[in-house]
Image (spheres, rainbow, N blue to C red):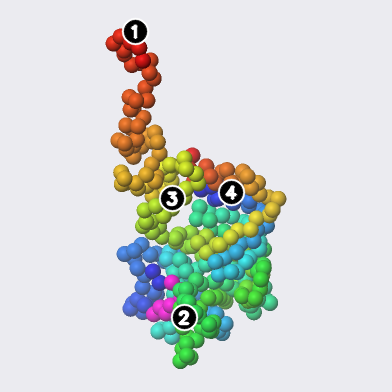
Amino acid sequence: MVVGLREFAHRTGNGSGTPVLDESNGEELMRVQPSVAVALGNRSLESPGTLYITSRKLIWLSDVDMAKGYAVDFLSISLHAVSRDPEAYSSPCIYTQIEVEDDEDEEDESDTQSTGALDLSKIREMRLVPSDSTHLDTLFDVFCECAELNPEPIEQEEEGEHNWVFSADQMVVGGGAEEDGEWPISQSPTSVIGLSIGDEGGLAQPMLELQINDQRFDDAEEMVHESETKDH
Amino acid sequence: MLFFSYFKDLVGQEVTVELKNDLAIRGTLHSVDQYLNIKLENTRVVDQDKFPHMLSVRNCFIRGSVVRYVQLPPDGVDVDLLHDAARREARGA
């Protein structure tokens, strides 16, 4: 997964100039919006172009320069909004903020490298200006839909990382209703974290059962004495 | 799911969302989803120094994963109730 904005020039060769999608990964085209101009960061508007909204990313392709295009994954879009305030920007647009790769010691906040070339991966804001501003609300909604289609990927969590302990008597298995696996349960019999006493699920350990069923915990009256007159 | 339910109950209230990039946005909570993606209405930027061009936008969708804090109206929170509920949720009760 690529963080941030990047160049995109992968168009189909059939002359339609549409972008090539990663269909093997389930990427689908959600909406095509022609006549959209794009402004990256503080730069001026680039047009004419077409906006392609896929289930994974935003792609803007220039209508005149077949080699020019930009793409950003929805995973990298922190925020999007409808901007109509003329004081904020001259044209009504969809304003987006893009997450950039965290670089330490970045003193220079400009998005141009020392050679003057534009470093797309440092772009933090992008505006999309449709020539017809009545499309803005629909575009906003499609962006929302696509953002919802791209939640944070669930990583393989390390053992014990998310097992918050609040008190000494907390030994709880994550509730069965948890669908998204937030509470990883250790399968190792030597690990105590994540086990609960009396758990009827598959994690009851022989050691815990022994403690409960141990005869030493039985009431004294149940023990049979051979002689009732025996002195103690 | 606790905070999803909690935020659903807060819909309509004024909140301030602080993002991990330090931007703070104030607005009316319009909706929230299971990933804690947040939609705000009538938003305005709290501190305009970092993103002066954003100023006021009408509707805003904030990705849940970039939220650092959600500041709630002080009289809109029963801290003890939330505290207990969070502890119970963590215990899987």
Name the kind of residue labelled 4 in the image.
Tyr
Mark 1 surroundings: few (<14), some (14-19) or many (≥20) residues within 10 A: few
Which residue has dot 3 on it? Answer: A163
Q: Quadrant of the N terminus of chain A?
A: bottom left
Q: CA distance from mark 3 to mark 4?
A: 22 Å
x%, y% of residue A215? 33, 24
Host chain of mark 2: A
Asked if badges 4 and 2 are on one and the same chain, I answer no
Contact between marks 1 and 2 (CB within 8 A): the answer is: no
Q: Which mark is residue B6?
A: 4
Contact between marks 1 and 3 (CB within 8 A): the answer is: no
Contact between marks 4 and 1 (CB within 8 A): the answer is: no
Q: CA distance from mark 4 to mark 1?
A: 67 Å
Which residue has dot 1 on it? Answer: A229
- Above or below A202: residue B28: below
Q: Which mark is residue A120?
A: 2
Asked if badges 2 and 3 are on one and the same chain, I answer yes
